[in-house]
Image (cartoon, coloured by chain):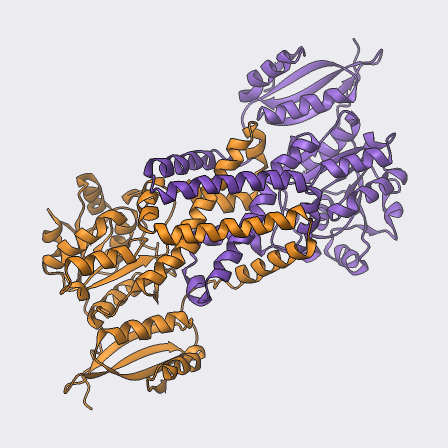
Chain colours: A orange, B purple
Amino acid sequence: MAEAPDAKGPRVERVALLGTGLIGASIGLALARDGIDVRGFDTDDRALARAVELGAVTTAAPDAAGAVDGVDAAVVAVPVGAIASLVVAAIDAGAPVVTDVGSVKAPVVAAVESLRPDAARRFVGGHPMAGSEQEGVEGATADMFVGATWVLTPTTTTDARAYTTARALVRRLGAEVVAASPDHHDILVALVSHVPQLAASTLMDVATSRESEHRTLLRLAAGGFRDMTRVASGQPGIWPDILAANRDAVLDALDGYVAALGTVRTLVERSDRDGLLALLERARAARRSLPASASVAGDLVELRIPVPDRPGVLAEVTTLASRLGVNVADVEIAHSIEGDAGVMVLVVAAADADRFESGLHERGYHTSRTVLS
Amino acid sequence: MAEAPDAKGPRVERVALLGTGLIGASIGLALARDGIDVRGFDTDDRALARAVELGAVTTAAPDAAGAVDGVDAAVVAVPVGAIASLVVAAIDAGAPVVTDVGSVKAPVVAAVESLRPDAARRFVGGHPMAGSEQEGVEGATADMFVGATWVLTPTTTTDARAYTTARALVRRLGAEVVAASPDHHDILVALVSHVPQLAASTLMDVATSRESEHRTLLRLAAGGFRDMTRVASGQPGIWPDILAANRDAVLDALDGYVAALGTVRTLVERSDRDGLLALLERARAARRSLPASASVAGDLVELRIPVPDRPGVLAEVTTLASRLGVNVADVEIAHSIEGDAGVMVLVVAAADADRFESGLHERGYHTSRTVLS
């Protein structure tokens, strides 16, 4: 079988940036620093002008279609409620690949697939797990995503080229890619982002509203309390949209949290030392297992996986890698010149290769391995 | 009225350190660095030997009484359940002033007052709002308390000399003193420390127990989640005692937290954007009002308050200062040579002086003010 792998990886020289707020402008700064031509648009003229001034946008466009003209990819960085229509606008204006940075994925992906069933394959949902308490373009930094995890949500309709382009873009920002289905992403962020945000804001609110002598209370708030409530100092404006879009997963996670607090209450009421210790020790073990960094370190291995050339395979293989905790340094689809078959080439950490191959074999894939120097 | 103020402040040249764990050894390191002779004792021989090795203890004593012999003050730094009996041992061995570092105060103070009603005036409850995820003597650092808030809990039985000595000791460690009654302290720490600890550990536990695909979940945990759950990585062993000792205040604060989460649930369920925004904005304002540091900055004013020489006045005036958020740089009791009256001299931030004087006048005190250069 002859192959024609694209050895240089997907070309990303010109990118449309739709939305120049905190996240959008940070992406723009990083891309521009990396020599990429950033065509920007924002409905807020002043934010756009400021993004140009700060170097987050190379050229300001008069509208979304103008920004998208001739680019290799478009990044939509607007509040959750406005994403789908802007993704569709970018697709309609001819963007070969579109990705976004919204905190909720299933409703966005579903809306795009429903609005443009034929072109949705050019869209890959995305969500950088990074940010800051700063607001807007003034808070943007080129290094915001270095070492951060960035979720991409390929589906059975996602085109392999769209995925590898979005992935290459994210990697150029310094982030590590985790692939998950849109639904799974939303359940996970309810647990690690949305409910924690509500828990922190509520904790802060309860502490101050229940205690009339605020000054003493606030002076007693040591490092632990400050750490716990830090996210409560962030911009509130983005949250109503996010919570509405991810309502069911948030309610489910919130119910789980409140139920667990009820169990803890019983342990405290009974002064059940063993029960309390067991909870605290379980939590400590889990907290200590949080990876310090998502980056791929050490020796690398190349796995080649002959696959039928259909997009569902891409989603299955990439989300499997993320589920198994396999660090993927690179993904490439090498199409066969004749026929529909192809080879998916994944570069992974050598330490993860056995685990990944076992998982692939269980799902009926064949693999061949090359150890990279 | 002739006065005989002790211009040099209370003498603290030799201190007994009973307990050489994380907090005790950190106190020892700071005191020893400051030239104080630290007489240490710990029931754990190895921890004591290591404290001597690291310089946290100048001289190891064979028992608590041996450590206390001839000191100006004793610091009890053992787990909450063991404090009261060791405070009594230190009092019985002749320590002129005893303080502790337990996370719960009302039961400790009550136990000491009940066990030694005549000598309890030599005891001042204390609680440094500082710590680390490290454990034991190996985690100790001399700078642990620099800039930290340290609660002292004088009561109507507390002797003025015991308070000013404990206060001077705490200030030499670099901490800022907040005075509160033992009960009020316990309510406050339930809100800013005990329930937050349970909330963080529960959040971490729920996230991992509800999500079988831990690897993906953990990789998605960004800075906000890490901040929120950081305290969950600390030593669990101290908590069952603390939670048992402060059970009622913890249950009350926990109930308030769960009730508030129930309100939030309703807001999410209804996608009540205005309600969610109001909560998040209230919490943000409160979080942003957390003082960056408790230290006294700027111009100082000396307030002289003629007071009847009875200990209750000390507790009332010092806790009033803390309740009003008045930064107190120094406290001194100048006794009159004839009669029972005295003058309490407080050095406070000039910006706080008006507020403090109003509060004192409301309570029937007279004040005179001197602006310090």
Residues B65 and A34: in front is: B65
- From what the image shows, is residue A193 above or below residue A330? above
Q: Is residue B46 visible?
A: yes
Question: Picture coordinates of residue B67 (x, y %)?
Answer: 85, 46
Residue drawn at (51%, 36%) of the image: A206
Quarter where residue A361 is shown: bottom left
The image quadrant where one finds the N terminus of chain B is top right
Q: Position of residue B128 (x, y in %)?
A: 66, 41
Percent of width and height locating residue B192: 57, 40
Q: Does residue A9 appear to the left or right of B199 in the view shown?
A: left
Q: As rendered, which of A67 and B347 lies closer to the eye?
A: A67
Q: Residue at x 60, y 16 (%)?
A: B359
Residue at x-position 62% and y-position 49%: A266
Rendered-image quadrant of the C terminus of chain B: top right
B326 lies above or below B231: above
Residue A356 horizontal/vertical position (percent) = 40, 79
Front residue (pair B302, A328): A328
